[in-house]
Image (tube, helix red, strand yellow):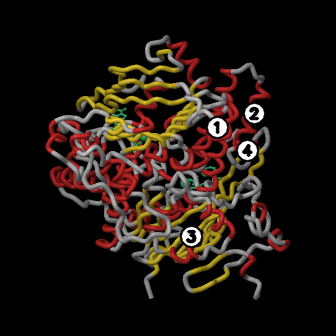
């Protein structure tokens, strides 16, 4: 049995937004609405899902960058759910996040050298300026950036170059768990391949574990062992990657897979178009949250929240189409 | 039916845009020629850092405030130069004639302005709509790009939105004034494939209705195959190959293009390691004298080290900047 590195249970994040002209009443955006999952040591779990379904929020909750509304997070055997800042310091190095928006996550007043050297210094991974500088250059090289970039500032880079700076910074401290939020979305496919190969190598070398959030399904398929599909604050389906692509069960997963663009200008498309507008996380639909857009919705989907249905050891789905037996 | 040859709505001629930084000159765009035909969709792909966004920023005249400058070249909109015109004329072009979707939303969204006000700003500036009409139009376009709770979102701030929602706000800002030309820089990177499909459909619909021409910068070759008529491939501040979308995908004539196409991860095909083009872009301080791709090229010949190749032209306006395309070196890749 593989070791569970991260256990997440009933995780919720409700963002308050003001309502009414005076902003007196409060409403809540249910960004993450009761998420349960386990991540095994040394595995890559991919997370895909509709834009705005709570992927980044989930990542930030696990790395304790924002406060959760409720839920339990157990990391490496320690219940870190209620850790305060001081206690978090001991785990901070072990959980690193690669941010979705590199521009917003890099300090504009620091040079790239300083940005990458900072965590090395904080966690005392190098001693002395010379060693630190050497390590910084090494890390930059690994993500395909030459040493001449080191003294430059974030705004002087292209989108993809900035993204790679974020990757180098996260990998610098040799964490246990890396939460990578769209880490390769701004890279051309050749550099993307290099970075993905590097992430795979590092994973094997240091037994790293990744939570890999992305919307490019072929990338997710390549890097992941398992994949979780999210919809409006919850998981819809989780499965071994091969199984998910061969035998997608949730109608949302099926629609998602059918919409992948094919790199062939003559390819014929056979898309499942999702009807209806995207529901709001302020007032999510009753029952199964996907029922308003599902092409196979039944009466009970409108009222009953689907429970986890285990298809096999590695595959579970939250959909009434598969829980008839009960 | 006779095919009508469309005129060029936008011509970029021999563009050179350099940044004069404390650490030396960065030749971000170093001799780029691009023609955008009226009513067509042109894809721009290429190496990260090859000058795609800077080309777009040069067209949009957004280099002010950076250390960048157009040092040489022309940009013609409908035949008229737009580099050397007054500030007032430039301001009018933006938004009404040319709309731009920026690569990183947070670089161009104002963090302290409400979403609705940011979208309405363009509308109120470029049309004689009343505030109420502008608000209604704003909500409508947000719904068209699948933004949930549109009537509420207009009163929210950028930090309250997810990455993909911010990206769609940028799309709304660019589309709301029905521009003649849309420059879309990685407009769908943060979107899941179903919403991406909806957005692409909306853009193509607008292209048909208002005859918009589109410059589409992206790394997603699946998207290129789906929406683009023509493709330009960039490497190291230059265009290295251009042609119609079928030719580029089926008969690439530049080793960089070929390597790029071979690096696409394929859905449903399992491999241990992904293919990539070996090596990295050259350090600008030690820029190769000849072809800039030569140090990484598996077809490298002596001449490639010595002389930068010019464009060699095939049928259908297909062009490649590779010595192998010259007759005496074989005539093709
Ligand atoms: N403000 C700036 N100051 C200095 N150099 C810059 C600036 N902006 C861009 N550059 C440099 O210009 C080159 C081209 O950048 P550009 O943003 O056009 O690349 P790109 O092709 O859009 O790449 P990507 O696919 O990663 O977005 C890069 O080497 C980049 O480092
Ligand atoms: N600081 C905030 N205040 C209020 N609402 C927020 C805040 N941050 C996120 N949200 C809301 O939470 C929901 C989930 O956002 P999140 O960023 O987690 O989505 P995501 O799955 O990462 O989407 P994307 O794929 O577009 O990046 C969205 O409806 C968003 O508007
Ligand atoms: Mg996100
Ligand atoms: Mg760019």
Nearer to the camera, B260 or B302: B302
Distance (Cα) linking label 3 and label 1: 30 Å
Element on which disc 3 rests: strand
Question: Residue, x 34% and y 64% (percent of image)?
Answer: A197
Q: Which residue is mark 3?
A: A228
Q: Which residue is mark 1?
A: B172
Crowding near the residue tagged with mark 2, few <14, some 14–19, many ≥20 C-alpha atoms within 10 Å: some
Label 2 resides on the chain identified as B
- Residue A177 locus on image (x, y percent): 41, 68
Question: Residue, x 40% and y 32% (percent of image)?
Answer: B54
Q: Earlier in the sequence, mark 2 or mark 1?
A: 2
Q: Are marks 2 and 4 on the same chain?
A: yes
View extreme (top): residue: B86
- Residue B13 locus on image (x, y percent): 39, 24
Question: Residue, x 75% and y 65% (percent of image)?
Answer: A294
Question: Residue, x 79% and y 65% (percent of image)?
Answer: A286
**Which disc number belongs to residue B137?**
2
Does residue A198 appear in the picture of this structure? Answer: yes
Q: Which residue is mark 4?
A: B143
Q: Are marks 3 and 2 on the same chain?
A: no
Label 4 resides on the chain identified as B
Element on which disc 2 rests: helix
Look at the image and tell me in which quarter the C terminus of chain A lies: bottom right
């Amino acid at each position: 049995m593989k070791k569970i590195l991260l256990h997440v249970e009933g995780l919720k994040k409700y963002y308050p937004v003001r309502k009414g002209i005076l902003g007196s009443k409060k409403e809540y955006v249910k960004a993450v609405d009761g998420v349960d999952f386990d991540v095994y040591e040394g595995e890559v779990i991919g997370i895909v899902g509709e834009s705005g379904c709570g992927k980044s929020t989930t990542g930030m909750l696990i790395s304790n960058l924002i406060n959760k509304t409720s839920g339990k997070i157990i990391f490496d055997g320690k219940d870190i759910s209620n850790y305060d800042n001081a206690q978090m310091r001991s785990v901070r190095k072990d959980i690193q996040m690669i941010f979705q928006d590199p521009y917003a996550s890099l300090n504009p007043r620091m040079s790239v050298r300083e940005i990458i050297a900072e965590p090395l210094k904080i966690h005392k991974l190098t001693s002395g300026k010379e060693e630190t500088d050497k390590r910084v250059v090494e890390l930059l090289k690994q993500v395909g950036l030459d040493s001449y970039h080191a003294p430059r500032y974030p705004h002087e880079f292209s989108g993809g170059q900035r993204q790679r700076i974020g990757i180098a910074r996260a990998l610098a401290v040799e964490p246990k768990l890396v939460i990578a939020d769209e880490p390769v979305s701004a890279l051309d496919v050749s550099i993307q391949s290099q970075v993905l190969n590097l992430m795979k190598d590092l994973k094997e070398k240091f037994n790293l574990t990744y939570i890999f959030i992305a919307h490019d399904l072929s990338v997710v398929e390549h890097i992941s062992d398992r994949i979780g599909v999210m919809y409006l604050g919850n998981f819809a389906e989780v499965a071994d990657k091969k199984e998910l692509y061969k035998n997608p069960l949730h109608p949302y997963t099926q629609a998602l897979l059918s919409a992948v663009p094919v790199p062939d200008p003559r390819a014929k498309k056979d898309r499942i178009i999702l009807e209806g507008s995207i529901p709001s996380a302020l007032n999510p639909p009753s029952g199964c949250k996907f029922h308003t857009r599902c092409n196979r919705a039944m009466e009970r989907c409108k009222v009953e929240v689907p429970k986890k249905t285990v298809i096999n050891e590695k595959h579970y789905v939250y959909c009434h189409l598969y829980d008839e037996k009960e | 039916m006779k095919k009508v040859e469309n005129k060029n709505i936008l011509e970029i001629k021999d563009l050179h845009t350099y940044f004069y930084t404390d650490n030396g000159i960065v030749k971000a765009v170093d001799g780029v020629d691009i023609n955008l035909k009226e009513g067509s969709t042109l894809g721009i792909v290429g190496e990260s850092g090859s000058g795609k966004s800077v080309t777009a920023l040069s067209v949009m005249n957004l280099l002010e405030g950076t250390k960048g400058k157009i040092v040489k070249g022309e940009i013609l909109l409908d035949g008229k130069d737009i580099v050397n015109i007054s500030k007032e004329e430039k301001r009018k072009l933006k938004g009404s004639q040319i709309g731009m979707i920026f690569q990183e939303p947070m670089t161009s969204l104002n963090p302290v302005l409400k979403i609705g006000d940011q979208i309405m700003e363009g509308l109120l500036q470029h049309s004689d709509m009343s505030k109420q009409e502008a608000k209604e139009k704003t909500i409508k376009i947000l719904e068209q790009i699948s933004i949930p709770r549109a009537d509420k979102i207009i009163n929210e701030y950028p930090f309250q939105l997810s990455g993909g929602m911010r990206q769609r706000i940028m799309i709304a800002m660019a589309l709301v004034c029905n521009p003649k030309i849309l420059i879309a820089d990685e407009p769908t990177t943060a979107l899941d494939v179903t919403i991406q499909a909806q957005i692409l459909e909306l853009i193509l619909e607008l292209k048909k209705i208002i005859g918009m021409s589109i410059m589409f910068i992206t790394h997603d070759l699946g998207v290129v195959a789906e929406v683009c008529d023509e493709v330009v491939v960039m490497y190291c501040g230059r265009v290295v190959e251009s042609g119609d979308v079928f030719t580029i995908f089926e008969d690439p004539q530049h080793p960089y293009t070929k390597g790029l196409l071979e690096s696409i991860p394929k859905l449903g095909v399992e491999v241990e390691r992904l293919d990539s083009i070996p090596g990295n872009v050259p350090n600008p301080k030690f820029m190769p004298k000849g072809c800039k791709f030569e140090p990484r090229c598996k077809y490298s010949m002596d001449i490639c080290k010595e002389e930068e190749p010019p464009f060699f032209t095939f049928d259908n306006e297909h062009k490649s900047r590779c010595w192998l395309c010259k007759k005496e070196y074989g005539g093709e890749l």
